Image (cartoon, rainbow, N blue to C red):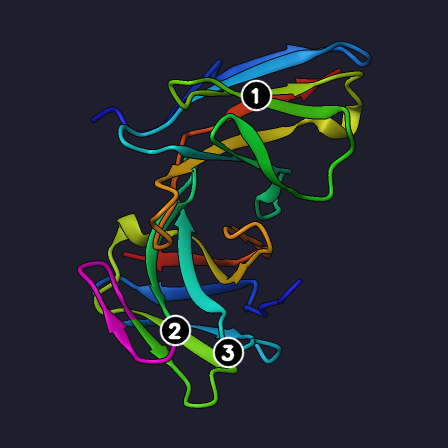
Amino acid sequence: DAGVTQSPTHLIKTRGQQVTLRCSPKSGHDTVSWYQQALGQGPQFIFQYYEEEERQRGNFPDRFSGHQYPNYSSELNVNALLLGDSALYLCASRRDTTYNEQFFGPGTRLTVL
Amino acid sequence: DAKTTQPNSMESNEEEPVHLPCNHSTISGTDYIHWYRQLPSQGPEYVIHGLTSNVNNRMASLAIAEDRKSSTLILHRATLRDAAVYYCILRVPSGAGSYQLTFGKGTKLSVIP
């Protein structure tokens, strides 16, 4: 079992550009959540996808959007990048019926110049 | 959001027990207490969770105060591989029938050989 995988590992963009990050959940998992982790901070919840729909959303602007595919993989899109969007973006998955633990991927390090 | 308070950092000697405290004075009756840890350059990893009773698993023990306003994560024998940031989180149910995890800054545990 490969666990949660994310791509790319690192990414460098410039202000105003758009970026797409990808996540493949752990086998058997149908719920995917995205988090943003700034340097020295804990992860902050962006949104959660289940059954191809956004089910919950944290306090992030509309520039952050996502998608979930029928195979449960997910994308995080960020438009009009700001310097403050530089962070580690984490994807986590779980089964919708399981409330015990989420499995996190290694993250994508985004740097905005 | 339900909040937790943890010390910024702690140190432990290798092979000695470690007690990581967490205060959550605003916890409500349906909030579960979760602990995750994040090793350097990795995504967070589930450690343990509980509601009212003390819990044990292969990684750690969780001691929950009788009034549930505080809890302690216990690592019985710290190893160098336990050096990480430990997050105490309240799992709060959402109106969408799901839940989200709200991370704080956590406690950075250093293990001294």
Question: Magenta stretch: dominant SS?
Answer: loop
Q: Residue at x 58, y 13 (%)?
A: A11
Q: Amino acid at mark 1?
A: His
Q: How far is disc 1 from disc 2 in space, using C-alphas? A: 33 Å
Question: Which residue bears the numbered disc 3?
Answer: B29
In the foreground, A27 or B109: A27
Determine the image quadrant of residue B57.
bottom left
3 and 2 marks in contact (CB < 8 Å): no
Q: Amino acid at mark 2?
A: Leu
Left or right of B4 in this view: B45: left
Q: Residue at x 55, y 68 (%)?
A: B7
> Which mark lies nearer to you, 3 or 2?
3
Q: As drawn, which residue projects farthest toward the bottom?
A: B66
Q: Residue at x 50, y 69 (%)?
A: B31
Q: Residues within 10 Å of mark 1 (few under 14, many from 20)?
A: some
Q: Residues within 10 Å of mark 3 (few under 14, many from 20)?
A: few
Q: Chain of mark 2?
A: B
In the image, which residues are magenta? B51-61
For mark 1, give the secondary structure.
strand
Q: How far is disc 1 from disc 3 in space, using C-alphas? A: 34 Å
Give the number of the disc on residue A67: 1
Question: Which residue bears the numbered disc 2?
Answer: B51
Q: Amino acid at mark 3?
A: Gly
Measured along the vertical axis of the image, is residue A87 above or below residue B89? above
Quadrant housing the N terminus of chain B: bottom right
Q: How far is disc 3 from disc 2 in space, using C-alphas? A: 8 Å
In the foreground, B64 or B41: B64
Left or right of A31 in this view: A17: right
Is residue B101 at all visible to an observer of this figure?
Answer: yes
Left or right of A100 in this view: A34: right
